[in-house]
């Protein structure tokens, strides 16, 4: 092994690690070095340097038998995660934390390092280590506001649920290792074809899906999400809902497509067969039903976004069930645009929470009169999440459902996954109702009785970033090939290898 090549391929992670350690040192120094502005500036510079290292320094290739992997698709996903980290840094600086300022930014970067590690590996042990590194940093980030009982409760629930999920994941991986004798996904796939009927393999896969289901907030492993989204500081919740979900679904796709390719089974109507597709089918159906129905009755916008995210997890799991190149492209495209819209929505929610003291629907009343730009941006984000054309969310859902309809014989004699696609279409329409409830408050309800939103606490840069996210959402809706094209070419390179 050439260790210089090892350093080059991991240069983005190394840059973020050095910057995070430097920020911790600034926190120890105290004074102006520990202020939010200085820490945010260094964090943002670190993210830019990591992007530069990813573009110019890190070569494509595999090292240590798939322990470290970098190809065009991984590079693209890493770039998306780093972009979301940069936005989260801006939102965190705008939030002006008064508690453990330097540690807030350092933990955000540590979480990013963990996410970058898991998307750039085909080794189960590195997946576990990366997930735990990201998880521990996010647990701390959610609970730094110790004087806030909601944040303390959110962090505790996040930690407890995460610890149990990690135990399931690790034990499931150990059972899989016991069957195939390797932890490398490519080698594992070849070994598992000879032992596909082993009952212990089914148990191991089911336990591993518990751990991954927690990371992507899929039912029935979703109970932590509403409390964390509502109780954690808004920037932390925004990153959990965006960057963490992008990495979680990407590594779940790699884990199933590469490690368990050929063992899909079937969840087609009337043609069920054992495999991981029926397991995902149950999770997808429950996520769509529970997520969207629970979102209908929420009075907190952050809890509504949490349950909405659970519903979106169901849509993404539906696409994964197709187990095709098209489904992988659709999942990557949708997770990125979902992350962009969610980051922007949380940015607007953060403004309302700071200026009006809460995130209930009534706190958004008459926001358009005080903040027309942010109100327009919120309109774009929520309509995109609902899947209205010509926004990015419409094309994202179109690609997801098209990929699912290409599986299971829908276009032939068998109904295939049509039952799940129909369920997804129905609940996609349902989701429009609860998104419109927020927009009704913003555009049509008087702000009488609600504290004024002067916006004095929000700087020009956060406003520009939120508006830029809205522009990106509109732009990717009008020109989806700007993102889908590079994803398609990256998947072609991956399959060609």
Image (cartoon, grey):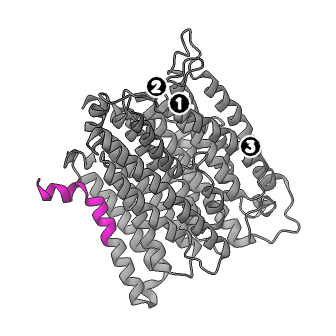
The mark found on residue 260 in the picture is: none
Instruction: Tell me how far mark 1 sits from mark 3, CA to CA.
Output: 23 Å
Residue 461 in view (yes/no): no
Q: Could you tell me residue 6's position as x and y percent?
A: 18, 56
Q: Main secondary structure of the magenta part?
A: helix
Tag 2 or tag 3, which sits nearer the N-term?
Answer: 2
Helix, strand or loop under label 3: helix
Tag 2 or tag 1, which sits nearer the N-term?
Answer: 2
Name the residue at 19% across, 48% down.
63
Mark 2 surroundings: few (<14), some (14-19) or many (≥20) residues within 10 A = some
Give the residue at mark 2: 265
Is residue 174 located in the magenta-colored stretch of the structure? no
* Pointers 1 and 2 in contact (C-beta within 8 Å): yes
Farthest top residue?
413
Give the residue at mark 3: 293
Farthest front residue?
199
Query: Is residue 36 toward the left or the right of residue 345 in the image?
Result: left
Instruction: Tell me how far mark 3 sits from mark 2, CA to CA.
Output: 29 Å
Q: Which one is closest to the eye, mark 3 or mark 2? A: 2
Residue 172 in view (yes/no): yes
> Range of the magenta residues?
1-18
Looking at the image, which is closer to me, 189 or 355?
189
Q: Could you tell me residue 198's position as x and y percent?
A: 38, 32
Looking at the image, which is closer to me, 323 or 263?
263
Query: Is residue 86 toward the left or the right of residue 174 in the image?
Result: right
Helix, strand or loop under label 2: loop
Give the residue at mark 1: 278
């Amino acid at each position: 092994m050439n260790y210089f090549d090892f350093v080059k391929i991991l240069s983005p992670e190394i840059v973020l690690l050095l910057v995070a350690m430097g920020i911790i040192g600034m926190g120890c120094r105290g004074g102006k070095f520990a202020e939010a502005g200085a820490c945010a500036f260094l964090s943002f510079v670190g993210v830019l340097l990591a992007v530069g290292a990813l573009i110019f320094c890190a070569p494509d290739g595999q090292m240590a038998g798939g322990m470290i992997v970098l190809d065009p698709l991984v590079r693209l996903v890493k770039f998306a995660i780093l972009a979301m980290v940069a936005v989260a840094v801006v939102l965190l600086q705008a939030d002006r934390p008064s508690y453990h300022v330097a540690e807030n930014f350092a933990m955000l970067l540590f979480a990013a390092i963990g996410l970058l590690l898991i998307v750039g590996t085909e080794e189960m042990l590195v997946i576990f280590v990366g997930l735990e590194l990201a998880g521990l940093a996010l647990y701390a980030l959610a609970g730094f506001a110790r004087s806030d009982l909601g944040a303390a409760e959110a962090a505790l629930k996040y930690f407890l649920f995460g610890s149990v999920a990690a135990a399931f994941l690790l034990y499931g991986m150990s059972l899989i290792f016991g069957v195939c004798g390797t932890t490398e996904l490519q080698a594992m796939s070849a070994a598992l074809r000879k032992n596909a009927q082993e009952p212990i393999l089914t148990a191991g896969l089911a336990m591993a899906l518990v751990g991954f289901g927690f990371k992507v907030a899929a039912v029935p492993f979703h109970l932590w999400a509403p409390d964390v989204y509502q109780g954690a500081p808004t920037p932390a919740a925004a990153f959990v809902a965006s960057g963490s979900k992008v990495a979680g679904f990407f590594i779940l796709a790699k884990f199933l497509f590469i490690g368990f390719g050929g063992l899909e089974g079937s969840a087609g109507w009337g043609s069920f067969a054992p495999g991981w597709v029926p397991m995902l089918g149950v999770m997808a159906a429950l996520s769509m039903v529970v997520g969207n129905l629970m979102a209908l009755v929420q009075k907190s916008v952050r809890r509504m976004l949490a349950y909405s995210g659970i519903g979106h997890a169901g849509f993404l799991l539906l696409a994964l069930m197709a187990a095709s190149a098209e489904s992988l492209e659709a999942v990557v495209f949708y997770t990125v645009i979902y992350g962009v819209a969610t980051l922007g929505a949380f940015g607007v929610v953060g403004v309302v929470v700071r200026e009006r003291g809460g995130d209930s629907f009534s706190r958004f009343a008459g926001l358009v009169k005080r903040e027309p730009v942010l109100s327009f941006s919120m309109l774009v984000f929520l309509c995109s999440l609902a899947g209205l054309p010509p926004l990015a969310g419409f094309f994202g859902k179109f690609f997801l459902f098209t990929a699912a309809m290409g599986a299971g014989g829908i276009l032939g004699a068998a109904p295939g996954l049509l039952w799940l696609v129909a369920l997804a279409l129905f609940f996609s329409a349902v989701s429009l109702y609860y998104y419109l409830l927020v927009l009704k408050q913003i555009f049509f309800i008087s702000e009488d009785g609600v504290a004024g939103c002067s916006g004095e606490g929000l700087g020009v840069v956060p406003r520009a970033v939120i508006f830029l996210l809205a522009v990106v959402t509109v732009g990717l809706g009008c020109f989806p090939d700007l993102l889908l094209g590079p994803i398609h070419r990256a998947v072609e390179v991956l399959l060609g290898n």
